[in-house]
Amino acid sequence: MSTLADTIHIENVVASSDLGQELALDQLSTDLPGAEYNPEDFPGVVYRLQEPKSATLIFRSGKVVCTGAKSVDDVHEALGIVFGDIRELGIDVTSNPPIEVQNIVSSASLEQSLNLNAIAIGLGLEQIEYEPEQFPGLVYRLDDPDVVVLLFGSGKLVITGGQNPDEAEQALAHVQDRLTELGLLD
């Protein structure tokens, strides 16, 4: 039997690291095949990988941000490839720069339609924002785990702000429990 936790899918993992040195981005973008650098538009080099599908933003300070990966493992693999490619250019990169997950965005479903007006009233105004004229979802800010859950009338959810994949499951369980307590879930 499937559970609501089975509906959770990681959509994006954002992580950061630091190469520990300043970089010459003009030269890096020339030497790194496929790298894009348009300093008028964005202050970093964009380096895309097809496998695992991701984009790494490389800044002059040596800081890097990897985005678009679908798992924490993919982030580590992608940054490992990026660090290796940079090393091949003769740039000294420490063997294992620390990688810190900044944000995980997941989607999930409560598998039924939701009455967002009733949910807004039931949950109270402390932790929610709901302005359907501005945005079709209800914004529910949780303290534990420290994430934001967007609830939509379709029953779909977006869970963002987590740094660990388990937080999406905890958030989904919390939302399900609260809505059940309020009599707003079948």
Image (spheres, rainbow, N blue to C red):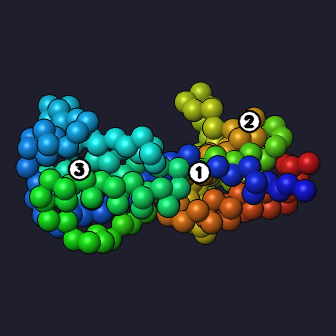
Sequence-first disc among 2 and 1: 1
Sequence-first disc among 1 and 3: 1
Badge 1 vs badge 3, beta-carbon distance below 8 Å: no
Residue identifier under label 3: 58
Between 166 and 91, the one lying in front of the other is 91
Outermost residue, front side: 88
Q: Is residue 7 above or below residue 93?
A: above
Q: Pointer 2: residues within 10 angstroms few (<14), some, or many (20+)?
A: some
Q: Residue at x 34, y 55 (%)?
A: 81
Q: Is residue 77 above or below residue 57?
A: below
Q: Pointer 1: residues within 10 angstroms few (<14), some, or many (20+)?
A: some
Outermost residue, top side: 133
Q: Amino acid at mark 3?
A: Ile
Where residue 127 appears, as percent x and y from the top left, is 60, 56
Q: Amino acid at mark 2?
A: Gly
Q: Mark 3 to mark 2: distance in Å?
A: 39 Å
Q: Nearer the viewer, mark 3 or mark 2?
A: 3
Q: Residue at x 26, y 72 (%)?
A: 95
Q: Going by the image, does 24 lie left or right of 174? A: left
Q: Residue at x 27, y 58 (%)?
A: 84
**Residue 98 seen in this snapshot:** yes
Between 103 and 123, the one lying in front of the other is 103
* Tag 3 secondary structure: strand
Between 95 and 63, the one lying in front of the other is 95
The numbered mark at residue 10 is 1
Where residue 138 appears, as percent x and y from the top left, is 64, 42
Residue identifier under label 2: 153
Q: Going by the image, does 99 lie left or right of 87? A: right
Where residue 39 appears, as percent x and y from the top left, is 14, 35
